[in-house]
Amino acid sequence: MWSEARHQKIRMLLQRHGRITTEDAIGELGVSRETVRRDFLALEALGLLQRVHGGAVYLSDEPPIDKRNTIHIAAKQAIARAAAQRLRPPVTLFMDAGSTTTLLARELARLSGLTLITNSLSAAACFTENPGSTDNQIIILPGVLNTALSSTSGASTILQIQTFHADIALLSPVAVNARQGAASFLHDEALIARAMSEGAAETWILADHSKIGASSRETYCPPERIGRLFCNHQARQTEGFEALRKKVGEVVLVS
C-alpha cells in the first residue's frame, strides 16, 4: 500500500473513532510497526494527528460533515442559490466536497447544460435525487474513498483534476481572509481545492459569515485569484471583511 493510501486510511480511522492504537494500525494496514511509526510522524508534522503512548488521536478544528450540514443552514442555502443563479450554461465546473457545495449541487441539479467535475459523492448524488435536465454531465473523480466526508482524495484524484480545464471552480473553504485567501484545515482537501482553482479560468468561493476573516492551516487560493466571493450579509460585521472585499474580484452578499 502506497504511503498516500496509508495516510488516508489512518485519517479515516481517526475521524471515525477519534483514536487508533499502533497495533490497530498495523492490523488495518498490513505493514510493519516501523512503517506505522513513520506514518504517524508524517501526519503529526501536518497537524492531522497527535501521537500518544501506544497510538495516535485525531485533531480537527472543524466539526465533521454531518454536523457541518446543520450549521448556518439558511445562510448556506441562500449562498448556494445566489451562486447557481449567476451561472450561464453551458459551463464546465469544478466542485469540492463540503456542506455548502452539497447544497449548491441541489440547486445545480435544476439546471441544464452543465459539466460538473467533483470529488463529492454527496454532490453527485443530488443529480440522481433531482435529475432535472438529462444533458448534464457529472464526472466523479477517482481516488481513495473518505467515508466520513463522502468524498474521494489522494494522488489519483489530483492527477485526474489536472487533465481537465473548467470555466469555474466552486469551492467552500474552512476560512477566508485578506492575507491567506481561501484555506482548509485538512491537507488532502487543500490539495484538491488548489488543483481545482489552478485548473479553472475563475474561482468562486462560497463562505458564510463564520468563515470570513478566519484563518486555517493550509492556503489553496490567494485572495487575488478569487473572482467572486459569495457570503451572507452578516459578513459585513466580521473583522477582516473590508480588507478581504478590497482584494477579491467581486463580493456577492445574500440575505
Image (cartoon, rainbow, N blue to C red):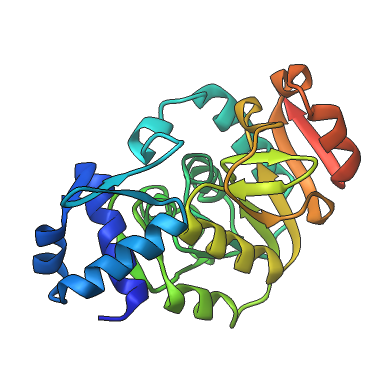
| Residue 208 appearing in the image | yes
In-front residue for pair 114/224: 224
How many numbered marks does the figure carry? 0
Give the quarter of the image for residue 85.
top right
Q: Quadrant of the C terminus?
A: top right
Q: Is residue 120 visible?
A: no
Quarter holding the N terminus is bottom left
Does 243 sit left or right of 78 as displayed?
A: right
The vertical placement of 79 against 255, above or below, is: below
Report the residue at 15% width, 59% height from top.
22
Which residue is at 51% across, 74% downward? Answer: 158
Q: Nearer the viewer, residue 111 or 58?
A: 58
Q: Residue at coordinates 65% horizontally, 45% vertically from top-left? A: 84
The residue depicted at 78 percent of the width and 21 percent of the height is 236
Direction front: furthest residue: 53
Quadrant in which residue 156 is drawn: bottom left
At which x and y percent is residue 98? Answer: 48, 46
* In the depicted structure, whether residue 81 falls above or below residue 205: above
Locate residue 86 relative to residue 20 in the image: left or right: right
Residue 189: image location, x then y, percent: 50, 57
> Residue 219 or 64: which is nearer the viewer?
219
Residue extending farthest to the right is 246
Q: Position of residue 173 (x, y in %)?
A: 59, 45
Judged left or right of residue 15, residue 174 is: right
| Residue 61 position in % (x across, y down) | 46, 36
Q: Is residue 32 above or below residue 106?
A: below
